[in-house]
Image: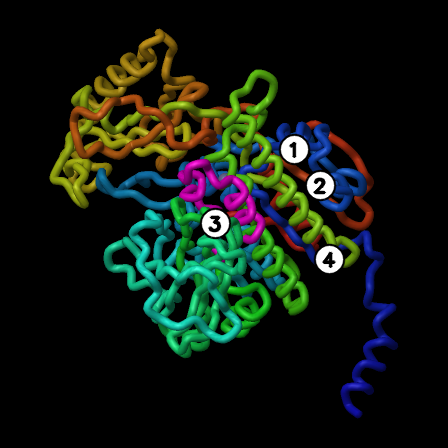
Amino acid sequence: MRPRAALLALLLVAPALVASPEEPPRRVVLVSFDGAGGLERLRQSAAGTFGPDGFEKAGRIGLAADRLVVVTPSLTAVSHASISTGASPDRTGIVSNWYLPAGRPVGQRVSGFEETPAVETLWEAAARQGKRVAALSWPGVSAAGPRQRTALGFLWVEPRERSFVIRVPGAALTEAAFALPLGVRSFSPPRALPVRSPHEGEAGGALAGLAFAIVDGTDDGQRNYDSLVVLSRDGQLVARARAAEWFALSERRAEDRGDEDVLVGRWCRLVALSPDLSTVSLYVGGLGSTEAWPADFRRTLDREAGFWPGAPDPLLLHESPPDRRGFVEQAARFSRFFVAAFDVADRRGDWDLLLAYQPVLDEAQHVLGPPGAGGEGAGERARLDAAALREVWRVADEAAAGYLRFAPRGDVLVVSDHGMRPIRRVLNVAELFRRNGWLRAGAPAAGRPQVAADSPVDVTASGGAAFVAVNRAGQRPGGVVTDERADALLAEMKGVLRAMTDPEGEPLFEAVLGREEARPLGLDHPNSGDLVLLARDGTGLRASLPASPDAPLLSTSELTAQHGFGPDPELDGLFFHVGAGIAPERVETFPSVGIAGRVAGRLGIQPPGELP
Ligand SMILES: [Zn+2]
């Protein structure tokens, strides 16, 4: 009877312990919709894209900003570091997604996702003050070190094996040399489809021992095929799909990379199957498994959310015609996985602050065109892309509704890290610097020239921003440039870069700034190096030396939209705060560096501060 007695005791004392719901401490869910532009959210809202329970509800019952003013450059790692700390990049030191930190030799790179900010994060401040934090793939909680861990969480993971597409001309398909299981009939001779990963060194996880066959399920006296069946080694039916249908292949491993009882799997889609077999296209998704802690959380995720399903795959858009529907369905599955993980964490309930993440708008916009495209006068492709993007906004809206279900029990803040801008071309700044003699190429690695250890200058780039570092003697190991020479070099680079135009005579850079000149942008930090370059409209930046010295400086962009340029309302994010005592209000802007302090206030703790 002890549990009952304990419950009774709790009920008796509870009213005295529970503060008025407006008062802290409250539990808080902070969810970031990567790449969700505030202005685009308003346009989609005006176009009637959303249902009543997601973004519209957040705007109806909470504080809503038209734009979350984000830091510069508006890159995922940079922006999340500033959201997480309440500090701009000149204090976090995380200035780009991929950069050369101060004091490191030229040629080295670090990921902004794996570096620790130079100031305290929200999750550290909360833990220090006795709160438990969950982080569901929150950028920055990378588990790379003790400062990047929370009590509960899971990581963003890349596929353990890459995706691929099997395309076999029908004539090349041989008759299946195996028997179909009971209940599977084919009224035309079943054809075997060989399915093997074309990627070297990838064993074909979750594919081992399976046989794939194309069958004819209709008894119409004609040789016409309509389905794919997947059979196990012992001849059992594992999956069956018609054209445009998905199926999962998975396996449970008793032991996997030191973990026990791990679910790994891949989502596959029969993209196309023509009855006469002239077109057979099978997409085999990347191999995924969830990396979460503690282990019991991971096992519950495996059971209730399935294996890590993987991000929407641009490979589907390379099909002819592009499989936009497949891409959107994959985005929806990925988005639902994150919401399902949130539901699992919610049922556990063992946290005060939960940091959640929704990546699909970023993934989709990079390849399906910028916001606002596809309108009047747009071509067929832009129109179809825009329609698909609208579907992804609906997916995000459904996810928002999922997190908002927590609102009666605590606060929900819905934010994002940046919007998007169209791009059409990419400028390779590393090659540009090499041609100007500022950067020296050294020995190649993996087929590409690397920056030489004695190169006078190094340059890194992400999105629309690049950072230039002079290899100063005494400041970087192996540095070769004296301060005097550095000044002359910087003056030369500024002059050339500011005057640079494309073949149409348009400047390529919006800004070429010395470090002090970058101070108003919040970028005056040693990790910014000596020069900050911000690309103009329509141009992305890359900084990897091409394999061939004849490669063009400007090339057509594979991505349709990008971010990480200078300040621009179109690159700002979205912001909602729903919680007891917060009056519905619409404001024009809210600063992204204001989020950490606001969340801390609702948790009833001191905001993140300086590191001890
Ligand atoms: Zn992002």
Query: Height in image: 166 above or below 88?
Result: below
Determine whether the beta carbon of the residue marked 1 sits less than 8 angstroms from the nearest atom of ligand 1: no
Tell me the magenta residue range: 309-333
Residue furthest front as drawn: 221
> CA separation, marks 4 and 2?
25 Å
Mark 2: few, some, or many residues within 10 Å (few <14, many ≥20)? many
State which mark lies toward you, 4 or 1. Answer: 1
* Mark 2 residue CB less than 8 A from any atom of ligand 1: no
Q: How is the image coloured?
A: rainbow
The first of marks 4 and 3 along the sequence is 4
| Residue 302 highlighted magenta (yes or no) | no
1 vs 3, front mark: 3
Nearer the camera: disc 4 or disc 3:
3
**Sequence-first tag of 2 and 1:** 1
Q: Secondary structure at mark 2?
A: helix
Circle 2/circle 1 CB separation < 8 Å? yes
* In the foreground, 43 or 477: 43
- Mark found first going from the N terminus, 1 or 3: 1
10 Å crowding of disc 3: few (<14), some (14-19), many (20+): many
Disc 4 to disc 1: CB gap under 8 Å: no
Residue 142 seen from this side: yes
Residue type at numbered disc 3: Ala
Distance between the Cα atoms at labels 4 and 1?
31 Å
Q: Which mark is residue 311?
A: 3
Q: What amino acid type should be assigned to the residue bearing mark 4? A: Pro
Residue 41: mark: 1
Identify the residue position indicated by label 2 in the image.
Answer: 55
| Residue corresponding to mark 4 | 25
